[in-house]
Amino acid sequence: MYGNSAGPPPTRGAATVITLRVLYAAAGFLSCGLLACVPLFRVAVLRGRWYDWTAAWASLPLSIACLAVVGSLPETDHRTDAAMAGLLLIGAAASAYFLVVDIRAHAAPRPFLGNPPPHAPFPGPHYGPGHSVGPYPPPAPVQHPVTPPQQQPAPARIDQVRAELDELSDYLRSHDGRDGGHQGGR
């Protein structure tokens, strides 16, 4: 009764999703590109694709190198401006990419991972009679016999519960009358 439920995990509310989206995007741009890897790592965790992981890991040394150029060269050098522009572009690109991927991930319908219902047709290609794919003949159609589960009718169960409650009520009234009243609300 109090154990783990078999249902899906609770979903995040819209406010939580938007707050996390803003924080991840802000980390990339407002840190002047130094934390551009944060939204990229979030994308890599969400999608798990190799190029997302590559972009996340590549942004880290790139932003550190640009920051080193900004810190080591004099302010009047044009390379300092180019490195700072590179940092800001890395941060803006990482934030924009994160927002696009995250919005698409939350807007896409979740795929159904369970078995198809028993009355659903086979989802494969239909070629018609005499056509098959490969050296084997097409499989025979599968019949799904649907038998409703046998259950006790609900009104009989309700009547049984009502009768038990009436019996309990009568018992408590007779018991309460012998004791001479209530005992402090118990």
Image (cartoon, rainbow, N blue to C red):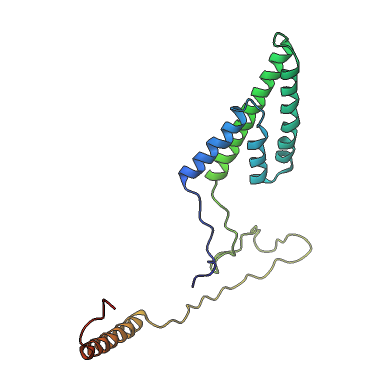
Q: Quadrant of the C terminus?
A: bottom left
Residue at image position (33%, 85%) is 160
Question: Please, which residue is most extreme toward the right here?
Answer: 135
The image quarter in which residue 72 lies = top right
Name the residue nearer the viewer: 14 or 133: 14
Residue 10 position (above or below residue 88): below
Q: Residue at x 50, y 70 (%)?
A: 2
Query: Residue at the location (48% across, 79% down)?
Result: 149
Q: In the visual, does 137 lie left or right of 152? A: right
Q: Is residue 111 above or below residue 46?
A: below
Q: Residue furthest top?
A: 76
Q: Position of residue 14 (x, y in %)?
A: 46, 44
> Residue 126: x, y in percent?
64, 59
Between residues 123 and 98, which one lies in front from this camera angle? 98
Pinpoint residue 152: horizontal percent, then vertical percent.
41, 83
Drawn side of residue 119 relative to residue 50, left or right: left
Q: Position of residue 173 (x, y in %)?
A: 23, 87
Against 83, residue 48 (above or below) is below
Instruction: Kindly indicate the quadrant of the structure image that contains residue 139.
Output: bottom right
Question: Which residue occupies the extreme front position in the image?
Answer: 184
What is the total number of numbered labels drawn onto the structure image? 0
Apparent side of residue 42 relative to residue 169 in the rendered image (left or right) = right
